[in-house]
Image: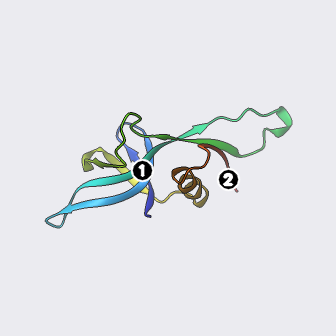
Amino acid sequence: MSVKLALLKSGETIIADIKELISEEKICGYLFKDPHVLTLTESIYLAEQAEDDSVGVTFTPWIMFTNDKEIPVRPDWMVTIVEPAKEIKKLYEEKVNGTDSEVSFTEE
């Protein structure tokens, strides 16, 4: 699986198995497999815990009302594609394989 984070023009951060769609040696689009919106959730801490750098993340299916697992995306909607942090990639893979959708991620 080639899991990547894509920032779209809409401002959404999508995590998916992303593949390039190529025609005549040019990228004509991208294919997102199992796309989810990656959302940060604020954690509420007591004053003495305020130094904790952890944040919550939630994975929500990108297009809620479809059974399609693969969704083509036009290249002009992409701002950038980057490699996700190891922890985020692992959590996403667990999510698409059937585990919980809300987890905590701590930066070191």
Q: Left or right: where does residue 18 sit relative to residue 58?
A: left
In the image, residue 70 sits, relative to residue 46, either above or below, namely below
Q: Residue at x 29, y 44 (%)?
A: 77
Element assignment for label 1: strand
Q: Residue 107: which numbered mark, if any? A: 2
Q: Viewer-nearest of labels 1 and 2?
A: 1
Query: Which of the 4 image quarters holds residue 27?
Result: bottom left
Residue situated in front as seen by the camera: 82 or 66: 66
In the rendered structure, find residue 63 and report the number of the disc placed on it.
Answer: none
Looking at the image, tell me whether mark 1 or mark 2 is earlier in sequence order: 1
Q: Residue 105: image x %, image y %?
A: 66, 49
Residue at the left extreme, as displayed? 24
Residue drawn at (70%, 57%) of the image: 108
- Kind of element beneath mark 2: loop
Instruction: Name which residue lies at 17% across and 67% down.
Output: 25
Q: 10 Å neighbourhood of mark 1: few (<14), some, or many (≥20)?
A: many
Residue type at the position of mark 1? Asp
Specify how the rendered protein is coloured.
rainbow
**Residue 18 as seen in the image, left or right of residue 73:** right
Q: Which residue is mark 1?
A: 34
How far is mark 1 from mark 2, CA to CA?
Answer: 25 Å
- Give the percent coordinates (x, y) of residue 21: 25, 59
Q: Residues within 10 Å of mark 2 (few under 14, many from 20)?
A: few
Residue at point 37% right, 41% down?
A: 67
Give x and y (percent) for residue 100: 62, 45
Q: Quadrant of the N terminus?
A: bottom left
- For the residue pair 16 and 65, the one nearer the viewer reads as 65
- Residue type at mark 2: give it: Glu
Q: At which x and y percent is residue 53?
A: 71, 46
Circles 1 and 2 in contact, beta carbons < 8 Å? no
